[in-house]
Image (tube, rainbow, N blue to C red):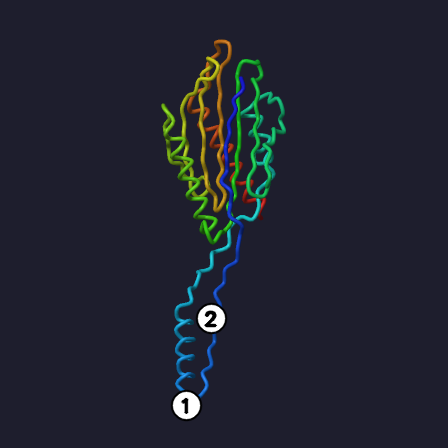
Amino acid sequence: MQQRRHRTAPRLATLLACTAVPAMLIAGCSSGSGSDDKGSQATASAKAAPTTPALAPARFATLPASCKTVTQGTVTALVPKAKDPGGTEAKSSDVQSRGGCSWTGNGKDGYQYRWLAVTMQRFSNSPELGSAEEQAKKRFADQVADLGRLPGTTTTALTGLGDQASSVSGKATVAKVTSQNDTVVARTGNVVLIVEFNGAGLAGKKNPSARTVHSGAQRAAKDAVAAVAAANA
């Protein structure tokens, strides 16, 4: 069973430094009216000069290696007999800003399909788009809303997982096989993480329970949040 997922991360605007420097005006003594006019114009220009508030530095400056976001113990527990225990890394043109990795396997008996994937996106400060954290908050909200609009899904807010986290659970049928799915969207600082965990019984075997898949997705998400912090320690 193969599932393909496509995501397009928004292009981030080039980071620019914007600093307003106040002008220091020195007015000299003069008896001519032209001198007074120039002084008035300079003062008016100084008062009209716009100021741009400085953006707070982004909390995280880099991302961990994509396939190291989940510990080997978690991979073994969630995807027994994974085809590639080291994971399959997603291609990225900028590994410091976005990345992903996935693991798949059919279990110890060959009839328990499992698929685990982690996607990361890190935002940088931008004069046009705002602070890195505000951009991440928007991305988090948009992603949860998009997933929650899928038919038959249930969205649950999570606590103790980064700064914000939600779980979107449900079922999906692909090639006549129905899987139990759970996606955790988490935000830690200026990084948004999307962790997907799916399971299905093949050839008439029983599917994993919704609770099992839900807890598995949360376990992987906690690993990913910790990996981001460790990469920036």
Q: Residue at coordinates 40% horizontally, 36% vertically from top-left?
A: 158
Q: Is there a contact, CB below 8 Å, between mark 1 and mark 2?
A: no
Q: Amino acid at mark 2?
A: Pro
The dot on residue 79 is none
Mark 2 residue crowding within 10 angstroms, few (<14) / some (14–19) / many (20+): few
Considering depth in this image, is 153 or 30 the residue closer to the camera?
Answer: 30
Which label's residue is closer to the chain start, 1 or 2? 2
Residue 212's image quarter?
top left
Q: What residue is shown at x 36% (from left), y 28% (from top)?
A: 154
The location of residue 88, given as percent across then percent down, is 61, 28
Q: Circle 2 sits in a helix, a strand or a loop, which is it?
A: loop
Is 222 placed above or below 107 here? below
The Cα atoms of the two marked residues, 1 and 2, are separated by 28 Å
> Which residue is drawn at the image coordinates 39% and 78% (left, top)?
40
Residue 98 image point, x, y percent = 55, 39
Residue 20, percent across and down? 47, 65
Residue tagged 1: 31
Q: Nearer the viewer, mark 1 or mark 2?
A: 1
Q: Categorize mark 1 by other alpha carbons within 10 Å: few (<14), some (14-19), many (20+).
A: few
As shown in the figure, which amino acid type bears the numbered disc 1?
Ser
Q: Which mark is residue 22?
A: 2
Quarter where residue 157 is shown: top left
